[in-house]
Image (cartoon, rainbow, N blue to C red):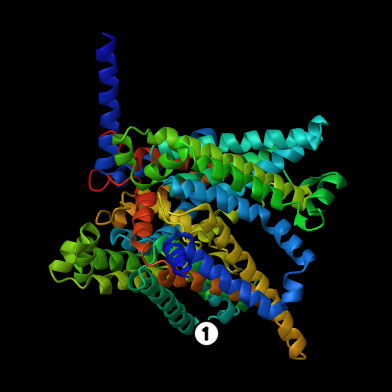
């Protein structure tokens, strides 16, 4: 009797795990909806169009930042420069715009150029010099952060142009942020890159088994460097958008995104082992991260309690998604 | 002569060689920039030891974990935990600071046990699990001490800054203590087990070593060293701050890598010391180099941000240098990092 009970429990646990791991993206959406429902149940006033639109805006921003990270993880690498590149691009944007809209194209070109350069450096160090990507991207992100301190002397620098700001935070029909229009271009682009292009197929193949990919004629090193370049460029674009959202920027303003993008991507079902994952999953993961932080804000928890809850939730997510097998097995 | 040659060849192959080369380079750089008289002066040496002992101890704690094949990036914020507990126990209960230090040590051990639970028992990827731990410990720190406050009695920080027998920096006592304990441990069964477990947990298990137990011992030793680091941080700053030292986690990890520690079963405590020495002295050299420039070129001014930029670029170059100095260890190092992220060497494609 006791035994069968225990078996039944284990079976349930396995069911849950199978359900979670068969489609992490679906699970992330379910958890987000539950979290939002709990938030609303505790504080009914939080159910309004404003909170809806701010969740949408932040989710899209985090998805932009996670897009590159998704590619790099699928390719079996890791990019910690996302946060630093975003902050640096945001500073570049506000600094050059200086409250005017005239320089938008110049800003775009410069941000993309900076992203490409940093991505190239990441790729070169991780692939050609063959250092562990985690350590080398961390070191590079430190250098990028220091560079932005030198440029701004550590203070706020300029403002984003009003029309550019309006094109991001302005609302359609009173509740859909105009940022969605950018997403209509960017999300299909990333989908095309990952799922329909030659690059995407070779990326999955390489992440799955680099040796086999090399043997079938994929230029592994080229794809690897390219994925770091794309990642940094997408991060730079996210930084520009972030600058418009914040209106002004200072050093390290988006540094948190290095880790939150990583968590969003993992929660969305992209595996660290490479070769598995999707951008749709990362968007769902971003939604989960944003609803969690929205919930913690709405509940008016103090900062230390928020930190505590955030840490514990992340550990719980890791337990659901990412446990290694026991040594004995 | 031949003996000397052989000894050198052996040293060349040892894990600490990479770190030692970089360390030597940076010492020479310091001597060039400051002049030997000033660099080797008692005051300078004492200041170097007392100001950097927390980082050095944190790096040694990290080294223990790296050898055991795991890591804890939350070491930095745990130093603040020890600091916060020590100060608040002293303030609120009106007891001696020494009681506070004892309880701070207990806090460090508890935090380490928690990290062991995540990484070894629940088998979460160490890098991510310990990153989550940063949030948890940060929250606890601020709950205990809402804002920076407190001060310790003068006798404590005066002692910390003093020199024993006129030439040994007091802070070096911590270093000697940890090195002595480690040297003893290396002669015990644990010394062999930790390398076996770090190198290949499955093989170690097959050979009759319990990896979870050995990693628990490693985490406890790390907790002890972290506690000492927190105590030395408290003595150095003479006050309490719940949000300090967080960056020590990453810096200690870079110091270990630069010093030539690989992941799991490779490297020695000396690597940690050389790595920290490199990080600390490079900043020192850059500071004096800019000082020199100010004196030599009249009207030359830059912000302190430039110094940070230059020293971070040199740290980055130091990482690139490890390729030349540590060719053999590279593959092991890379494999180890893959393991830290992906959680175990077996999770691949098993869902």
Residue located 61% across and 71% down the image: B282
Q: Which of B104 and A208 is in front in this view?
A: B104
Residue furthest to the left in view is A216
* Furthest residue in direction bottom, as rendered: B298
SS under mark 1: loop
Q: Is residue A44 visible?
A: no
Q: Which chain carries label 1?
A: A
Residue furthest front as drawn: B1
* Residue A8 pos. (x, y %): 26, 19
Left or right: residue A68 compared with residue A82: left
Position of residue B75 relative to residue A2, above or below, is: below
Find residue A266 and report its horizontal and vertical position in percent: 36, 50
Identify the residue shown where x is 55% and y is 41%.
B184
Snapshot quadrant of residue A279 = bottom left
**Residue A288 vs residue A276: left or right?**
right
**Residue A132 picture location, percent across and down:** 39, 62
> Is the N terminus of chain A in the top left, top right, bottom left or bottom right quadrant?
top left
Provide residue B166's location: percent of width, then percent of height.
Answer: 82, 57
Q: Is residue B263 visible?
A: yes
Total marks in image: 1
Q: Residue furthest top?
A: A1
Q: Which of A202 and A16 is in front in this view?
A: A202
Image quarter (top left, top right, bottom left or bottom right) of the C terminus of chain A: top left
Residue position marked by numbered label 1 in the rendering? A102
- For residue B78, side relative to residue A201 (left or right): right
Q: Residue at x 55, y 62 (%)?
A: B275
Please tell me in which quadrant of the rendered image residue A43 appears. top right
Local crowd size for mark 1, using a 10 Å CA cut-off: few (<14), some (14–19), many (≥20): some
A301, B199: nearer the viewer: B199
| Nearest to the observer: residue B199 or residue A23 | B199
């Amino acid at each position: 009797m006791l035994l069968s009970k225990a078996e039944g429990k284990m079976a349930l646990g396995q069911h849950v795990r199978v359900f979670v791991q068969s489609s992490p993206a679906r699970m992330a959406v379910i958890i987000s909806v539950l979290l939002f429902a709990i938030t609303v149940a505790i504080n009914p006033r939080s159910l309004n169009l404003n909170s809806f639109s701010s969740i949408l805006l932040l989710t899209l921003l985090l998805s932009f930042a996670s897009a590159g990270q998704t590619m790099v993880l699928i390719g079996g690498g890791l990019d910690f420069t996302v946060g630093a590149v975003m902050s640096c691009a945001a500073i570049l944007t506000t600094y050059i715009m200086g409250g005017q809209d005239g320089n938008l194209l110049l800003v775009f070109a410069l941000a993309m150029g900076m992203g490409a350069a940093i991505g190239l450096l990441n790729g070169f160090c991780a692939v050609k010099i063959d250092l562990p990507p985690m350590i080398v991207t961390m070191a590079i992100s430190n250098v990028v952060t220091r560079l932005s301190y030198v440029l701004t002397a550590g203070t706020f620098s300029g403002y984003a142009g009003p029309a550019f700001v309006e094109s991001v935070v302005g609302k359609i029909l009173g509740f859909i942020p105009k940022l969605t229009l950018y997403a209509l271009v960017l999300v299909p682009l990333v989908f095309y890159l990952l799922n329909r292009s030659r690059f995407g197929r070779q990326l999955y193949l390489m992440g799955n088994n680099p040796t086999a990919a090399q043997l079938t004629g994929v230029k592994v090193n080229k794809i690897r460097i390219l994925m770091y370049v794309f990642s940094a460029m997408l991060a730079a674009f996210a930084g520009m958008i972030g600058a418009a959202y914040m209106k002004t920027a200072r050093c390290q303003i988006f540094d948190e995104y290095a880790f939150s993008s990583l968590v969003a991507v993992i929660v969305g079902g992209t595996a660290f082992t490479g070769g598995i994952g999707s951008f749709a999953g990362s968007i769902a993961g971003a939604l989960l991260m944003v609803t969690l932080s929205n919930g913690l804000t709405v509940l008016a928890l103090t900062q230390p309690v928020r930190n505590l809850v955030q840490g514990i939730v992340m550990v719980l997510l890791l337990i659901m998604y990412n446990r290694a097998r026991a040594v004995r097995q | 002569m031949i003996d000397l040659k052989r000894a050198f060849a052996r040293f060349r192959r040892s894990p600490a060689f990479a770190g030692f080369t970089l360390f030597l380079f940076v010492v020479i750089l310091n001597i060039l920039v400051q002049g030997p008289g000033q660099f080797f002066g008692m005051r300078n040496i004492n200041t170097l030891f007392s100001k950097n002992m927390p980082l050095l101890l944190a790096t040694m704690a990290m080294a223990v974990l790296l050898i055991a094949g795991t890591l804890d990036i939350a070491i930095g914020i745990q130093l603040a935990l020890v600091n916060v507990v020590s100060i608040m126990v002293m303030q609120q209960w009106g007891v001696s600071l020494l009681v506070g230090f004892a309880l701070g040590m207990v806090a460090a051990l508890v935090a380490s046990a928690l990290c062991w639970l995540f990484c070894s028992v629940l088998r979460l990827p160490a890098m991510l699990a310990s990153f989550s731990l940063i949030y948890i410990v940060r929250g606890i720190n601020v709950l205990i001490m809402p804002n920076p406050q407190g001060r310790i009695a003068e006798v404590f920080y005066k002692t910390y800054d003093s020199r024993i027998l006129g030439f040994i920096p007091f802070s070096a006592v911590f270093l000697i203590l940890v090195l002595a304990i480690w040297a003893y441990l290396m002669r015990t069964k644990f010394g062999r087990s930790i390398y076996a477990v770090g190198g290949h947990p499955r093989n170690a298990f097959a050979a009759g070593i319990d990896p979870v137990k050995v990693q628990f011992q490693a985490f406890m030793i790390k907790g002890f060293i972290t506690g000492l680091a927190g105590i030395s941080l408290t003595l150095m700053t003479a006050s309490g701050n719940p949000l300090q030292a967080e960056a020590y986690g990453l810096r200690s990890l870079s110091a270990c890598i630069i010093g030539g520690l690989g992941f799991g079963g490779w490297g020695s405590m000396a690597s940690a010391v050389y790595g920290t020495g490199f990080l600390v002295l490079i900043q020192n050299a850059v500071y004096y180099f800019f000082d020199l420039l100010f004196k030599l070129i009249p009207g030359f001014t830059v912000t302190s941000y430039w110094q940070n930029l230059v020293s971070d670029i040199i740290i980055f170059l130091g990482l690139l240098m490890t390729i030349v100095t540590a060719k053999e260890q590279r593959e092991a190092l890379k494999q180890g990092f893959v393991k830290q992220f992906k959680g175990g060497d077996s999770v691949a494609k098993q869902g």
